[in-house]
Amino acid sequence: MGQAAATVRTSGACRTGRDRLVQLAPFRQSVDHRLPAQEAFSAPFFQGLYGLTLSPGKGLLWYTPLFFASLAAWPAFFRRHRIEALLAAAVVVVNILFYAPWYLWWGGHSWGPRFLVTVLPFAALPLVEALAAAKCHRLVAVGVAALAAASVCRPVPGCGRQL
């Protein structure tokens, strides 16, 4: 215990000394952490909302057609897993609403909806119910398989593209 405490005190003293050294005039650097004026939540909200969800250029439904099956299965998922369904929907909706007014809502020169990649696991949770329904109904199985194939094939052209 004594050696660990001495190590913590020594590392704290080193950090404090380093911080004081950096604050000296010859080492001081002027760093402005504010965003430039153009980087703001300044885009028209509904333009970003449409663009992130439905547009053929960057829309989540366009680049991940399997999300249609997820939307269709959400009510059944909600009936069986109420808390998880609400959490998944909240994560997806909050992210979309957050990035819709961002000046660069499309994510720059990337393939697909770059800012929404992190919500895809949450958007996929209701697919559990879609797959359960696919076991019982052949038409549902064909539809889910077609949407899954489209979701895999859609981003392929962008894989070899240099941006």
Image: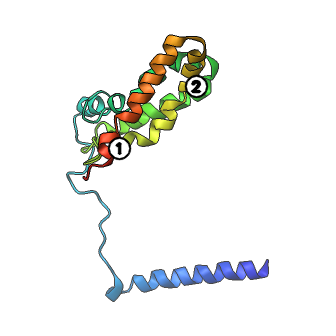
Report which quarter residue 134 is drawn in. top right
Q: Is residue 23 left or right of residue 55?
A: right
* Between marks 1 and 2 in the image, the one whose residue lies nearer the viewer: 2
Residue 78, x across and y down, in percent: 57, 20
Which amino acid type is shown beneath numbered disc 1?
Arg
Report which quarter residue 64 is drawn in. top left
- Residue 98, relative to residue 16: is it above or below? above
- Residue 36, relative to residue 57: is it above or below? below
Mark 2 or mark 1, which is nearer the start of the sequence? Answer: 1
The structure residue drawn at horizontal position 35% and vertical position 32%, both measured from the top left corner, is 60
Q: Residue furthest right?
A: 1
Which of 4 and 72 lies nearest the eye of the viewer?
Answer: 72
Which of 49 and 21 lies nearest the eye of the viewer?
Answer: 49
Residue 62, x across and y down, in percent: 32, 29
Please state, as top left, top right, bottom left or bottom right, where the N terminus lies in the image.
Answer: bottom right
The structure residue drawn at horizontal position 22% and vertical position 34%, both measured from the top left corner, is 44
- Residue 28, relative to residue 41: is it above or below? below
Residue 40, x across and y down, in percent: 26, 48
Callout 1: helix, strand or loop?
helix
Residue 8, x across and y down, in percent: 66, 78
Packing grade of label 2 (10 A; few <14, some 14-19, many >=20) is: some
Count of all numbered marks drawn on residues in the image: 2
Could you say which disc has been placed on residue 103 in the image? none
Q: Name the residue under label 2.
A: 128
Q: Mark 1 points at which residue?
A: 114
Q: In this view, does 65 lie to the left or right of 132?
A: left
Which amino acid type is shown beneath numbered disc 2?
Val
Distance from disc 1 to disc 2, alpha carbons, whole Å, reads 24 Å
Callout 2: helix, strand or loop?
helix
